[in-house]
Image (tube, rainbow, N blue to C red):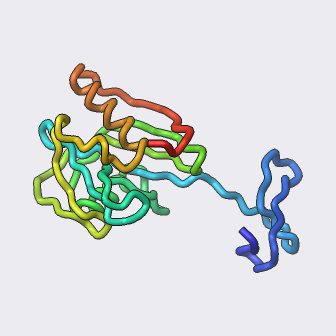
Amino acid sequence: MKYCSNCGMPVQLRIPEGDTLPRHVCSTCSIIHYENPKIVVGCIPEWEDKILLCRRAIEPRHGLWTLPAGFMENAESLAQGAERETWEEANARVEMGELYSIYSLPHINQVHVLFRARLLDLDFKPGIESLDVKLFQESEIPWDTLAFRVIHEPLNRYFEERRRGQLGFHLGTIEDVCK
């Protein structure tokens, strides 16, 4: 950040009085500009024993597979955001289920929230951000071409827990960008 969004004057990176972290502070109007993590919301859409995955049509990780997920928008709940992202990426209608996982990714200032969801029908097709959408049984999941570690870990855990008949909630941190 170089300029204040309030008055347009230059900002300085410094620790404001009463704070403990460096912030962008306007040198003219003294407005403190806070930058906070972005929230990514998505779901694990289930149909019988299969999971719906989307093949990315956008960067990053163009051409690789992922769960339907994306950045939360203002004025929506976590579940509404996950439902919207599923519609945008897969034109799939879902009934949102329980919260499944929350992963912090401090190295990129993101928090990823995944719900379980039930597909309401098989009338889905790629959205503008997807090259393809497809249902996969566990044995068919393209593990080597999953786009993100933050998708690989909860999806792997989901299948392990499903085999045991014990799906639970998970909280975790992914410290680096390695897959």
Direction front: furthest residue: 144
Q: Which residue is drawn at 14% across and 36% down?
A: 49
Compared with 76, 118 (above or below) is: above
Q: Which of 90 and 72 is in front in this view?
A: 90
Indicate the quadrant where residue 24 lies.
Answer: bottom right
Indicate the quadrant where residue 123 lies.
Answer: bottom left
- Where residue 82 appears, x then y in whole percent? 35, 53
- Where residue 150 appears, x then y in whole percent? 43, 42
Quadrant position of the C terminus in the picture: top left
**In-image side of 114 versus 22 (left or right):** left
- Where residue 156 appears, x then y in whole percent? 32, 33
Q: Which residue is drawn at 45% across and 57% down?
A: 72
Indicate the quadrant where residue 36 lies.
Answer: bottom right
Quadrant position of the N terminus in the picture: bottom right
Q: Which of 103 and 133 is in front in this view?
A: 133
- Where residue 65 appears, x then y in whole percent? 30, 52
Q: Which residue is drawn at 37% across and 36% down?
A: 154
